[in-house]
Image (cartoon, rainbow, N blue to C red):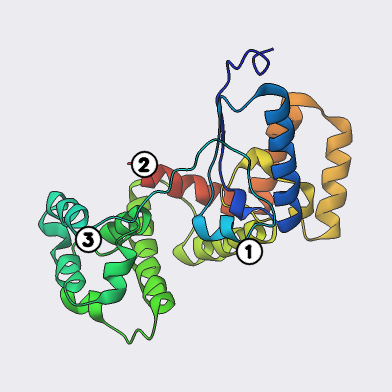
């Protein structure tokens, strides 16, 4: 009823993050929706490069392209951040890779956290032959900063354990073409050992609804400490 009355504004994000088959199906579904409800109340988000590679085009009324940050906007952001990221400001004056990454709001934010209260020598350490190596350096510092924040929260997991399970989770999400981690979206195929899968099947047959969901989450947390660790990291990030 809400869709028929156009009371719901549909915001569809991540079209370029889907598989090729899913992209075509999604575009077909959007066109079917438009044919029945009109074009009012729907927006689809996609990276420009990814959209250009799609086999089909969306039949929408208009398109808005978000432009990269310019030098003035970047400088204003860095000034507001204060002296804690002075090393980043110095590096940006001479490092073209950092300059290019800073034009994306997400990377500018990540760099501001990663290189907070660091020295110019730390930002410049190592040899960077391309953008990918600089990104790895930034993410290494960013991970260290986020793990340091978790010391304010209680956790039984070491840094090594946390990194191990975060790596496993990253590979699982990459395999599933997912960019957002949701505990409630976990599927049984994430259980690699047959014994774990059998335990899941046996448990699911005896429970249903909310009790099953709660038990499943606890079951996954027991098998994979990453789920508990990820909650700790998320809590630390929000502090």
Structural distance between the alpha carbons of marks 1 and 3:
28 Å
The residue singled out by tag 3 in the image is 116
Residue in the image at 44% along x and 43% along y: 64
Closer to the chain start, of discs 3 and 2, is: 3
Q: Position of residue 69 (x, y in %)?
A: 28, 55
The residue singled out by tag 2 in the image is 238
Vertical arrangement, residue 31 with respect to residue 83, above or below: above
> Which numbered mark, 1 or 2, is in the foreground of this view?
1
Q: Position of residue 124 (x, y in %)?
A: 24, 79
Disc 1 packing (10 Å; few <14; some 14–19; many ≥20): few
Q: Position of residue 90 (x, y in %)?
A: 14, 71
Structural distance between the alpha carbons of marks 1 and 2:
24 Å
The residue singled out by tag 1 in the image is 171
Vertical arrangement, residue 210 with respect to residue 94, above or below: above
- For the question of whether residue 180 can be seen, the reply is yes
Q: Is 39 displayed left or right of 131 in the figure?
A: right
The image quadrant of residue 98 is bottom left
């Amino acid at each position: 009823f809400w869709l028929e009355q156009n009371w719901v504004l549909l915001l569809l994000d991540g079209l370029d993050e889907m598989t090729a088959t899913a992209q075509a199906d999604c575009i077909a579904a959007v066109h079917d929706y438009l044919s029945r409800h009109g074009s009012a109340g729907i927006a689809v988000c996609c990276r420009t490069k990814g959209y250009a590679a799609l086999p089909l085009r969306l039949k929408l009324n208009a398109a808005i392209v978000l432009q990269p940050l310019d030098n003035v906007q970047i400088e204003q952001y860095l000034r507001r951040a204060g002296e804690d990221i002075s090393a980043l400001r110095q590096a940006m004056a001479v490092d073209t890779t950092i300059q290019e990454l800073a034009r994306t709001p997400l990377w500018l934010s990540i760099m501001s956290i990663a290189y907070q209260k660091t020295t110019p020598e730390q930002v410049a350490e190592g040899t960077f032959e391309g953008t990918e190596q600089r990104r790895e350096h930034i993410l290494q510092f960013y991970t260290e900063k986020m793990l340091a924040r978790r010391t304010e929260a209680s956790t039984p997991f070491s840094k090594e354990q946390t990194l191990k399970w975060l790596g496993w989770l990253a590979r699982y999400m990459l395999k599933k073409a997912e960019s957002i981690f949701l505990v409630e979206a976990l599927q049984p195929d994430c259980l690699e050992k047959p014994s774990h899968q059998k335990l899941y099947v046996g448990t699911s047959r005896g429970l249903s609804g909310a009790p099953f969901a709660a038990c499943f989450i606890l079951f996954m947390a027991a098998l994979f400490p990453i789920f508990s660790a990820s909650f700790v990291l998320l809590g630390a990030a929000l502090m």
